[in-house]
Image (cartoon, grey):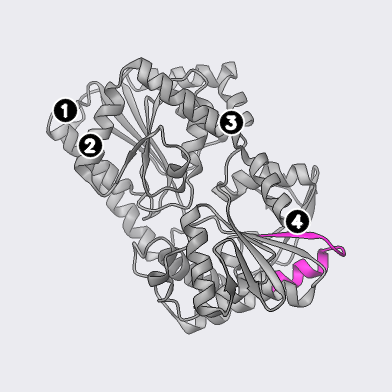
């Protein structure tokens, strides 16, 4: 956090920021983004090797572009329409205008022949707008969330415009092979592109399409986990929880994350006496997000009602069955919780990647703990030695939780060792280097 003359710079807790911060520092680039406030003028600053510049948004742009088309249309649609997406023409108008703002600011700030890396579903029109304004630039795009199959993407009234927007890039990359193929097929169907799943042709231009799963700064999480003060804090957490086995969930408070299903599985295990609050405790950290949106108010209410019901039925004096924290944690505190957890529950209904799964593994230098991972998280494609589960199958989820808690130490250590090799071999710096290498070609 950096104090300015009349405002404060504070790092967001999102996965995109966590992943990109070390990359941008290493590349000595400029980060252009929205500052999270309404009606504030443009700002810029230099923080170490990285420069930051903001694109201001008005209150109506936030309502229509961010809360509207980004969150209530694209986020919902791209996550398998778990919540029914909404389609409003005024939102699309705002989406086009805000993308034009970002493209103009980027074009203004870039030197000749510079490399531009555009991120995520908020800015899918920027590559083509930037290509039109600055054909000298190398332009890459990375989508952090899933790209939906054709039958879902077909719902979008502005599908062709978004596909053409992305075709302005030299490289379009995705978290998984499935998302990459979904995009290529949609572009050939609705944007007059030719080619294959890996290379599209638009006129005389070639657009590379690749699966490039994102990762984390593995060495940094490993370093933090070995600090004496962090390990002491992990022991304090375990002691405060009564020395019980710890099930941990760390998620944004979002309807895609599967938190209610996880709580129901835990509740049923307690009812069936397969687990007891005397020996096992669930800790759920839910980071607030988009709290003004109706869908998010509903998920918060549902989660809090479930936690209350579980504790009302199963807690004992000095032994709360489920601890629920609706706040973000500082990174050192988060690492301490990772170290304290016997089982990490990462069970989204749909997720582009889910970096929490990788963070947990990176912190477990002791080869302790076990990762329960949704089949529908992008991370499942790489982390095959986790205990994979369909989070909608409550009976299967219950079985996997019990399996994780009772797994022989030898098997658990073997699985964690293999997972750590995977996460170390492909960290965020390797991911960025791979992306920029392909883009440079």
- Mark linked to residue 424: 3
Q: Residues within 10 Å of mark 2 (few under 14, many from 20)?
A: many
Q: Which residue is mark 1?
A: 274
Q: Residues within 10 Å of mark 3 (few under 14, many from 20)?
A: some
Residue name at image x 66 percent, y 40 percent:
430
Dot 2: element: helix
Q: Which residue is mark 4?
A: 441
Are the residues tagged 2 and 1 within 8 Å (C-beta)? yes
Q: Which residue is mark 2?
A: 398
Residue 116 occupies which quadrant of the picture?
bottom right
Dot 4: element: loop
Of circles 1 and 4, the one toward us is: 4
Residue 81 occupies which quadrant of the picture?
bottom left
Residue 308 can be seen in this image: no
Q: Earlier in the sequence, mark 1 or mark 4?
A: 1
Q: Is residue 2 left or right of residue 280?
A: right
- Mark linked to residue 106: none
Q: Earlier in the sequence, mark 4 or mark 3?
A: 3
* Quadrant the N terminus occupies: top right
């Amino acid at each position: 956090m950096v104090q300015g003359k009349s405002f404060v710079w504070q790092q967001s807790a999102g996965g995109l920021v966590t992943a990109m911060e070390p990359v941008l520092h290493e590349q000595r680039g400029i980060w252009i983004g929205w500052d999270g406030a309404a009606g504030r003028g443009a700002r810029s600053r230099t923080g170490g090797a990285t420069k930051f510049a903001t694109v201001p948004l008005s209150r109506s742009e936030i309502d229509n572009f961010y809360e509207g088309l980004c969150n209530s249309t694209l986020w919902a649609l791209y996550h398998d329409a778990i919540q029914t997406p909404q389609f409003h023409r005024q939102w699309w108008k705002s989406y086009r205008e805000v993308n034009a703002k970002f493209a103009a600011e980027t074009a203004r700030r870039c030197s000749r022949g510079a490399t531009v890396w555009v991120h995520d579903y908020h800015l899918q029109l920027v590559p083509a707008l930037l290509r039109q304004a600055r054909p000298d630039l190398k332009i890459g795009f990375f989508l952090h969330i899933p790209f939906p199959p054709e039958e879902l993407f077909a719902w979008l009234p502005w599908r062709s415009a978004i596909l053409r927007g992305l075709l302005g890039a030299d490289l379009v990359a995705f978290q998984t092979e499935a998302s990459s193929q979904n995009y290529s097929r949609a572009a050939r169907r609705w944007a007059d592109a030719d080619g294959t799943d890996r290379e599209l042709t638009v006129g005389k231009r070639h657009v590379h399409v690749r699966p490039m799963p994102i990762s984390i700064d593995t060495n940094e999480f490993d370093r933090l986990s070995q600090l004496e003060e962090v390990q002491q804090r992990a022991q304090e957490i375990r002691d405060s929880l009564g020395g019980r086995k710890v099930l941990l969930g760390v998620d944004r408070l979002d309807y895609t994350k599967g938190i209610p299903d996880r709580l129901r599985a835990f509740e049923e295990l307690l009812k069936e006496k397969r687990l007891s609050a005397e020996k096992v405790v669930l800790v759920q950290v839910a980071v607030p997000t988009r709290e003004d949106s109706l869908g998010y108010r509903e998920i918060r209410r549902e989660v809090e009602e479930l936690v209350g019901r579980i504790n009302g039925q199963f807690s004992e004096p000095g032994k709360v069955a489920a601890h629920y924290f609706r706040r973000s944690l500082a990174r050192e505190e988060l690492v301490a919780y990772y170290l304290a957890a016997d089982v990490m529950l990462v069970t989204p209904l749909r997720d582009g990647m889910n970096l929490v799964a990788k963070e947990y593994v990176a912190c477990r230098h002791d080869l302790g703990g076990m990762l329960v991972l949704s089949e529908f998280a992008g991370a499942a494609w790489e982390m095959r030695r986790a205990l994979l589960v369909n989070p909608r199958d409550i009976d299967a989820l219950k079985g996997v939780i019990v399996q994780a808690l009772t797994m022989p130490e030898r098997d658990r250590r073997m699985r964690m060792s293999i997972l750590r090799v995977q996460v170390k071999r492909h960290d965020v710096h390797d991911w960025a280097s791979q992306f920029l290498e392909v883009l440079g070609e």
